[in-house]
Amino acid sequence: MPARFSKARVLVVGDVMLDRYWFGAVDRISPEAPVPVLLVDDEEIRAGGAANVAMNVAALGGQASLCTVTGRDSAAGQLKNLMLEAGVNATFVEDPDMMTTEKLRLVSRNQQLLRVDRETRPDHEILSAILSHVEHYLDSSQALILSDYGKGGLEHISEILALALAHGVPVCIDPKGDDYQRYRKATLITPNEKEFAQVAGRWNSEDEFRQKGRQMVEQLQLTGLLVTRSEKGMTLFEAGGDVTDCPARAIEVYDVSGAGDTVIAAATLALAAGGSLAEAMMLANEAAGIVVGKLGTATVSAEELSAHMGNTL
């Protein structure tokens, strides 16, 4: 199926961020306070959030478009350059009073020491301008991803979802928070186990977990619910009551940052390419098995996924 990704057109809408990494060595403690001193010798910038989702779609061979709100600042400019380099067709609606989300991670010997965040929420009226851009993109899209990081970029998610449904475009959502009612009638939502428990409540057995999954699909009128479960793999709940488990790949986990971005990108591409929900889960599981072996927010290429799948067949 990865060979069919090149004809799949996917629109990504949601919260973007710029991930900065400062790498160095810690050889002493500061005389000013009992904290380590990081001597920086290298730094990187990477796209995060919805921007990383779009980059994963492009890296997997799909045709990716991105629509988002940013500030009018250097972080937004750097994100634009990253999208251009990745071949993502991006529309940035700028809010001059907003600060584009940035996350600075200080890393020594592949261990994160500290994360520093900067962000403000976009203006409600600015967000309204996204709707016309989204409708334009939907005319030529085969799937829509809503990447919700709770940063305020998806305040109009109900309207966006309605537009997609009116265009007959499947909608896949990486959810955030405890209000899943706004995701009603989505094609697929992909919470991790912790996020799912936050909404559905805790369970004491696998049977109870499955009951809660089926209830969520029915109550929200979803086509599918894909719960990612770390070392336990993934579980797919489908409308009609079918439940399918996919075991995790037996690999060493290096970093789970951005793994959810890869999961939803691969699953959505599979659906856009004509695959079933079960095939989407299988591909997403394989892609996740690759990306958790990389440092920080990262992407998976079509070549990596094909090789990885070849080793499992």
Image (tube, rainbow, N blue to C red):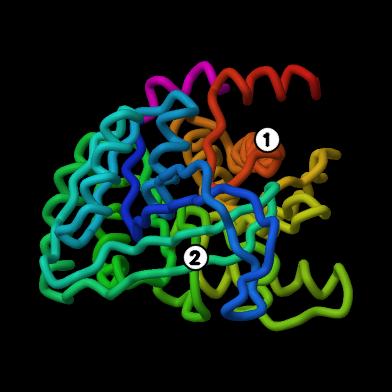
What label sits on residue 111 in the rendered view?
A: none
Q: Position of residue 76 (x, y in %)?
A: 24, 52
Q: Callout 1: 10 Å neighbours few (<14), some, many (20+)?
A: many
Tell me which numbered mark, 2 or 1, is placed earlier along the sequence: 2
Is residue 250 or residue 10 the one in the foreground? 250
At 44% from the left and 35% from the top, the residue drawn is 57
* Mark 1 residue element: helix
Is residue 256 or residue 4 the one in the foreground? 256
Q: Position of residue 116 (x, y in %)?
A: 47, 68
Question: Quick check: can you spot residue 237?
Answer: no
Side of 273 where 77 appears, left or right:
left
Side of 13 where 217 appears, left or right:
right
Name, please, the residue furthest toward the right: 205
Q: Main secondary structure of the magenta part?
A: helix
Side of 105 where 163 appears, left or right:
left
* Mark 2 residue element: loop
Mark 1 belongs to which amino acid? Ile
Q: Do the numbered discs 2 and 1 sit on residues whose CB atoms are within 8 Å?
A: no
The residue identified by callout 1 is: 290
Is residue 42 or residue 250 the one in the foreground? 42
Is residue 93 or residue 284 the one in the foreground? 93
Q: Nearer the viewer, mark 2 or mark 1?
A: 1
Mark 2 belongs to which amino acid? Pro
- Is-magenta flag for residue 3? yes
Rendered-image quadrant of the C terminus: top right
Label 2, label 1: how far apart the Cα atoms are: 22 Å
The residue identified by callout 2 is: 175
At 55% from the left and 58% from the top, the residue drawn is 106
Q: Residues in magenta?
A: 1-8
